[in-house]
Amino acid sequence: MANVLIYTAHPGRRYSHVNTALDAAASATDATCVDLMADYPRHNINVEREQERLLAHDTILFQFPLFWYSTPSIIKEWQDLVLEHGWAYGSNGTQLKGKTMMLAITAGGSADAYGKSGYNHFDLRMFLTPLEQTARLCGMTFLPPYVLFGALGAEKTDLLANHVAGYTQLINGLCNDTYDRAAAAKNDLIFADTIPDLVKG
Amino acid sequence: MDSLLFLAFLFLAAGVIAVPIASRLGLGSVLGYLIAGIALSPLLAALNVDVVSIQHFAEFGVVMMLFLVGLELEPKMLWNMRGKLFGLGGLQVGLTMLAVTAISMALGLAFSFAITIGMVLALSSTAIVLQTLNEKGLMKSDGGQSSFSVLLFQDIAVIPMLAFIPLLAAPDLIEMFSAEAADAAHGTDHGTDHGADHGADHGDGHDDGHDDGHGPSEPGMIEQLPGWQRGLVTVAAIAAVVLGGNFLTRPIFNFVSQAKLRELFTATALMMVIGIAVLMTFVGLSPALGTFLAGVVLANSEYRHELESDIDPFKGLLLGLFFMTVGAGINFPLLAANLLPIVGMTFGLMALKAGILLILAYIFKIRGGDKWLFALSLAQAGEFGFVLLSFTVANEVLPASIADQLLLVVALSMLLTPALFILYDRVIAPRFAASQSRDPDKIDEKGSVIIAGHGRFGGIVNRALLGAGYETVVLDHSSAQLDMVRTFGIKAFFGDATRPDLLHAAGIENAALLVVAIDNKEQATELVHYVHKNHPHVKIVCRAMDRGHVYELYAAGCRQIIRDTFDSSVRAARSALEELGVHPYAAERAMRGYVERDLMALRDLAELFDPNIPMHENAAFVERAKVLMAEQEAEMMGEREEHLTRSERGWKHPSGDNPSVEEL
């Protein structure tokens, strides 16, 4: 039984069908859900409180829309303040060692948009290397992100429903330790249709 | 009554005309007054005015000045000055007395005459020197402080001198001297006659006018007491001043403030100063010294600035009158008759005094420009000289003919002092200013931030600024508020911040920032207007009570206008939205947008507002207000999309199909 902490951050939440649905799904699981924009509407992040949250959980999942190839600004702010030297990294910074970090990302662009031939020119994983390296520096395992491409029209098709169902399964798998982390790690990205293969039982 | 008013008009008019001209010419106010007095003297002579008794009355200005000097001087500072006070002051008086006595004896005067002249000429002019030092802002310089120490010591030294002079009485010597003089100067009868008259006048003036003066007078009924009892009464009087200043001031001002009448504070301040002067005179001490002491006692009190601004105009007027009487009192016929010897004596005296002061400056390590400031500022004889001279004539210590000539020397040396200050300003100071690496100006007790109004609003601003390490001076006109504030150890002063003189006393000239947090709208606007116009270097942060007040403050020149309930109302609205289930960040953004639009509208309208045109008659203002109201209404009708703040648009994509640029 692993403790899972889900950080969600969407500054334009009321305009996002996808993230609203994902939030609802996450809230129904055993994971601890934190809406960073609700806790800190004025970006006044409480460092002690956040560090306590991190200590109380083994798996940290960030759920956010990809903005300008990166996180919404509050997650950057959270990193800057919470991941202190001597606490999260540095010679004595071992508090996060052994924990797991994972991302759940919704991207407006289609899968084709990413990669050498797409208009975004780089692979999605390339854009996420700062977060991956952050996890590594803190001694955390970085799992491949759970991704929804073409998120902007997703609610009009069954894409969204599939993604939300996969999300629920993923979180439950993480909580129950039924998610095969080793097998997942072999993928670059995880999609709704890969989830059933990775969750045992 | 009529003649009194006419005389008052005469002196006021002369001052009003002469001082601005002198100031424009860079001569300083003191010289302006002196010249005005000289110009008046023929008229006063024609009207048969007793200039000397006016002078004695005007000397009360010196008492007030020392009270004000005391207010600027905390007890600790006075204690730190003790070395200079007694060392420098004592040596200056002692050495000058010795030198003048020796020279007088060398010129063939009897010892009793010589030492009396020594005492008279050893003293300097507190009135001229302090007034000029203050005017030029040199009081806090090393030279200014040293000069002040010496002047203070002289004030103390007058007391034993007045006790000592009657012992030198020598009527037979005077008779002999007068006979010789009459023989020698038979040809110049006219001049000396006039001089004798003048001397007699002076003597009379002393008798009926002395009590007003700042020199100690003959003790009243106290004289009949045995010595130890007199000592006891004196100590009791000083103790009364110190204790009264410490413990009675606050209840008195609290009591007076209940009447809410501006002039009562002035009356209270005058009452205190005059009362102390009377008490000191009664026990045979110098009134100037007594009020100085009271000033020092009150230097730490919250009423300091109030007292300062109440007394200051009286001091200025009386000193001006005093300087004019000095100018008017110059006996020109006598001067003309003895031009060379008197001018020679004046220059000789000033050279001698300056020389001794230079030596002392060397010993006491006063360096550079300060050394010259010290030597030149104290080189004259002073108004104490007038007092002592009239006293000596009355006590038959000096013959009237010598006293009259000395009066001229004293007056001339005072007349020349502003010239020496000009010499210092133009020639000496620039030379040293160039060679010295100057320390940044010490702003002393004057804070860099003045906070007008220390209620719930100003109090928070003050605590925040103090917490950030800024020096603040707080002004509040509520005694009750001050009592509360003081219990928290906050430095607050009693007074109405809308009065320019009080702002001056609080150091508006050196202030960087003024925070206006007073309750009265009109007064706040007036204050902003005044400071923006007269002290443009001072930045202003002002509280507005409502939108109309915002426009008025904007028109008055303030750009940092904070509506007192606006921010809290916005926060309340935000909390309300959150409680209604709106996402906290959505509520935050909604209120940010609201504030932004509101400020934009406010600024628009403030630009169009004209304090001279009623709002409803201001066509442009009304037009813009209508447009803004229509926009606001449209927004409330639900056409929200138009009014999304610019940054919020980023979170939203125009249609579900195309990605917005930011959300990739």
Image: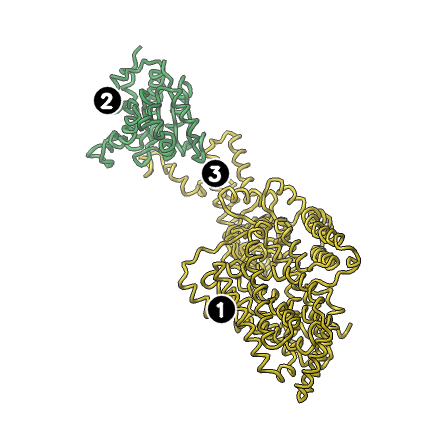
Residue A106 quadrant = top left
Dot 2: element: loop
* Chain colored green: A
Q: Which residue is mark 3?
A: B590
- Residue under numbered circle 1: B424
Colour convention: by chain
Q: Tags 2 and 3 in contact by the CB under 8 Å rule?
A: no
Label 1: how many Cα within 10 Å (few below 14, some 14–19, many 20+): some
- The amino acid pointed to by label 1 is Tyr
Which amino acid, mark 2?
Answer: Asn
> Can you tell which of label 1 and label 2 is closer to the viewer?
1
Q: Residue at x 31, y 28 (%)?
A: A90
Indicate the colour of chain B: yellow
Question: Do labels 1 and 3 touch, CB within 8 Å?
Answer: no
In the rendered image, residue B61, in percent from the top left (x then y), is placed at 66, 64
Find numbered disc 3 in the image and state the secondary structure of the residue it sits on: helix
Q: Can you name the residue that lies furthest to the top here?
A: A201
- Of mark 1 and mark 3, the one earlier in the sequence is 1
Front residue of A59/B206: it is: B206
Check residue A187 in the rendering and tell me which mark sits there, or answer none: 2
Q: Amino acid at mark 3?
A: Ala
x and y percentages locating residue A1 in the rendered image: 36, 13
